[in-house]
Amino acid sequence: MKKIIATLMIVVMTMLLMAGCGSNDEEEATTGATTETGTDTESGAENSEQALEGNLVSAEAKTFSIFLNFNNMPFDSEWAVWQEIAKRTNVNLEGVISKTNANEEEAFNLMLSSGDLADVIGYMNAAELEKLGRDGGLIPLNDLIEEHAPNIKALLDSDPKFRQGATSLDGNIYYIPKNQTLLSAEFYWIRQDWLDKLGLEVPTTVDELYTVLTAFRNEDPNGNGQKDEIPLFDRAGHKMPDEYLYLFDSSTEFYARDGVIEFEPLEENFVYGVKELAKWYKEGLIDPEIFTRGAKTRDTLYSANQGGFTHDWPSTGNYNSSLAEEISGFNNVAIAPVKNQNGEIVERTTRYPAPGWGISAQAEDPVTLIKFFDFFFTEEGSDLINWGIEGETYIVNDAGEKEYTDVVLENTEQTPLGYLRSQGIQYRIGMNQDPDYEYAFMTEEAKAAAELYNGHPEWYRDQVPPYFDGQLDLKYTEDDEAEYKRIMSQIRPYVDEMFQKWMLGASNIEDDYETFVQELKDRNIDRAIEINQKAMDTFLGK
Ligand code: CA
């Protein structure tokens, strides 16, 4: 009886959807019907699991609906690798998002308001997924993992970052994250050819860096007779203006030392760092347009042979080959983070598990689904989602290493990663990213950078909370989050404004600092720290 009502509801919902919305509804309606079929086929197959061969998670073929729209690419069951996955597991997924609906957020809200949830749900925003879980839309997976997902369980037990990413504020696991296994994110890059030309060594301290940048400024390393070099620049200056405070172990953000949250503008390193950056800026060591030049900065300044030093992702290594003909001897290398004024080497950017996928409360066979989720943490499943199909998107070479084929590497329209994702490989599901996958299409320079940084885990501090684009990215209860956002809407713009004033020399931090601190207190920074400490304690599992 229940089932009939559920089916009727789906039909009604589908009709409502068709009646209520514009041009995208045909796919929605079709996939609504698929959900129905999916739930029908699974009846009665519960007890045959012991006889299953290979990685089959079900004795007979089952179909489930899925909501997933990674980078606005709706899940497509026609993707070759997902057909292969279906063949090997007996689980077939049907996407519920119209291929013409490119807006992930809109599609998500549409699904929620329809009341008709897909069996499997993945979303870009971890907080939204967890909220859906706490509201009863996703089921807690803790017991299912314990009983049916030995590979996920093993990773939860062995990788604290993965466990922290997966665990919601209430202690439940509502989604399996996409785990990022490489530590490294951004690297410090310097023009080795400029160092060579000026007879300089690679800087190892922040003071040596100052000396090198000064030489870049004054001694014409690009050799055109003009003082046109821009020693320090960054293409993210418009969104992470405080990135070079990292050199002085500070930022305009919250940070945690030994699990204790602080707001860095209230700390000693901040005052020191701001004074230094103001000096550097005044002396022409920093891009005069660092706050405004925008996302093309790196392209512009390397192509013009003007950029000397930056902090950026592996792709910064690509210019050695792409500019080889234009700029003779162009040689960009990643160097270790320089020792800060306190003598420490610290890399602040690192990776955190991203949201993956969960099981909706309307899914009728969560046991099969959790087994299916577990498949991606087996060697076979991991290879498929990381590399695709052997012989098509990758091969295994004589040394036993995997290599992507030219279909991936020589694709003329997309980057290797872009191509993989467009085929549903490296898609945003609960999985463990194979660290080798990224090495496999790095340039030599990028590979050297990644090996250097990943070879020094001690440069990465323990117990550091997650960040997104330089901003703290912890999980909050709804009330805390509302209060925190309210407070920070009064604090962030003020801090950014003052930081820019000081760095650009429009004002002096020593004159303003007392007032600045008082202002932060008046705007309730202490309460914001308190909220973050609570969130941090939860993050650490306290
Ligand atoms: Ca010059």
Image (tube, rainbow, N blue to C red):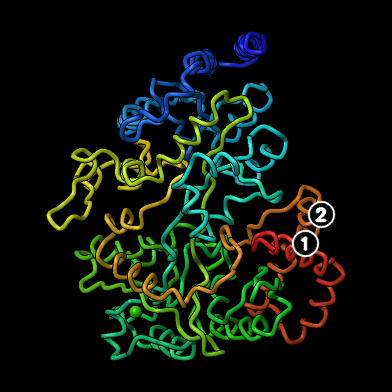
Q: Quadrant of residue 80?
A: top left
Residue at 29%, 70% in the rendered image:
448
What number is the disc on residue 468? none
**In front of the other: 236 or 448:** 448
Looking at mark 1, is its residue's CB closer than 8 Å to ligand 1?
no
Rounded to the nearest angstrom, the CA distance separating label 1 from label 2 is 9 Å
392 vs 381, left or right, is: left
- Contact check, label 1 and label 2, Cβ < 8 Å: yes
Mark 1 residue crowding within 10 angstroms, few (<14) / some (14–19) / many (20+) = some
Tally the numbered discs. Answer: 2
Indicate the position of residue 305 as horizontal and vertical percent values.
Answer: 32, 70
188 vs 32, left or right, is: left
Indicate the position of residue 440 as horizontal and vertical percent values.
Answer: 27, 55
Q: Which residue is mark 1?
A: 531
Residue at 62%, 16% in the rendered image:
21
Indicate the position of residue 233 as horizontal and vertical percent values.
Answer: 46, 71
Q: Is residue 30 visible?
A: no
Amino acid type for the residue under numbered disc 2: Glu
Q: Which of labels 1 and 2 is toward the front?
A: 1
Q: Which residue is mark 2?
A: 483
**In front of the other: 243 or 338:** 338
Amino acid type for the residue under numbered disc 1: Ile
Mark 2 residue crowding within 10 angstroms, few (<14) / some (14–19) / many (20+) = some
Q: Secondary structure at mark 2?
A: helix
Quarter of the image where the N terminus is located: top right
Indicate the position of residue 392 as horizontal and vertical percent values.
Answer: 21, 38
Q: Secondary structure at mark 1?
A: helix
